[in-house]
Image (tube, helix red, strand yellow):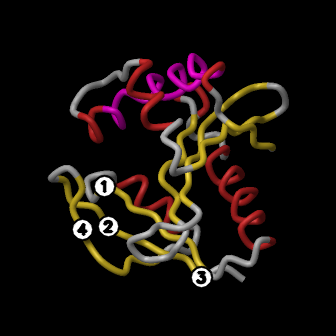
Amino acid sequence: MKFERVTAETLAAVLDIVNSNPAYNTMENDTPSRTLEEVESEFLNGESESYFIIDGDRKIGLIDFLRNNPNDGCPWLGLLMIHGDCHAAGYGRRAYASFEEQFVKLQYPKLRIGVFRSNVKALAFWKSLGFDPYKTSTWRGKDVDCLEKELS
């Protein structure tokens, strides 16, 4: 599994992956699909880093992270999304393991993530990977559980 930076030239592939997840889009943005302009704003924002998750020669997902959140000085994983056609095949777990390996090499002490409280499957997934809740917050009026993992 490898990672490739998202660019303006690859936004159509980003849109395909994002729109293959209508339930998540509805949970996050109250609409099942996103526009090219919306994904450009989210994945080429100049603050976070966005990468394709690549298995073989296929772009199977996206990962977005912020190396240093100015609000708490910690790295944050903003999104890990697997193409809808690839769900339940272990790609998310494998992609996160590869990603975490890079953060460990860079000697980051911990990683944080926010998960919509209503996203029960995602909360269970992150907890199974060793993330522990440390507070609840809101984002765009929605309850978010904030989780963190100590990296070794």
Instruction: Tell me the residue at 27%/40% (across/down).
Output: 27
Amino acid type, residue under disc 4 in the picture: Ser
Please provide the residue range marked out in magenta: 10-25
Q: Label 1 vs label 2: CA separation?
A: 6 Å
Going from the N terminus, do you reach mark 1 or mark 4 first? 1
Going from the N terminus, do you reach mark 4 or mark 2 first? 4
Instruction: Tell me the residue at 84%/31% (across/down).
Output: 56
Residue with the mark numbered 4: 137
Callout 2 crowding tier (Cα within 10 Å): few <14, some 14–19, many ≥20: many
Which of the pair 99/55 is nearer the observer? 99
Going from the N terminus, do you reach mark 3 or mark 2 first? 2
Image x and y of residue 114, in percent = 39, 62
Instruction: Tell me the residue at 46%/64% (across/down).
Output: 113
Callout 1 crowding tier (Cα within 10 Å): few <14, some 14–19, many ≥20: many
Callout 3 crowding tier (Cα within 10 Å): few <14, some 14–19, many ≥20: few
Amino acid type, residue under disc 1 in the picture: Phe
Label the magenta part by its dominant secondary structure.
Answer: helix
Quarter the C terminus occupies = bottom right
Residue 145, numbered label: 2
* SS category of the residue bearing label 4: strand
Residue with the mark numbered 1: 116
Going from the N terminus, do you reach mark 1 or mark 3 first? 1
Amino acid type, residue under disc 2 in the picture: Asp
Going from the N terminus, do you reach mark 4 or mark 3 first? 4
Question: Depth-wise, is mark 4 or mark 2 nearer the camera?
Answer: 4
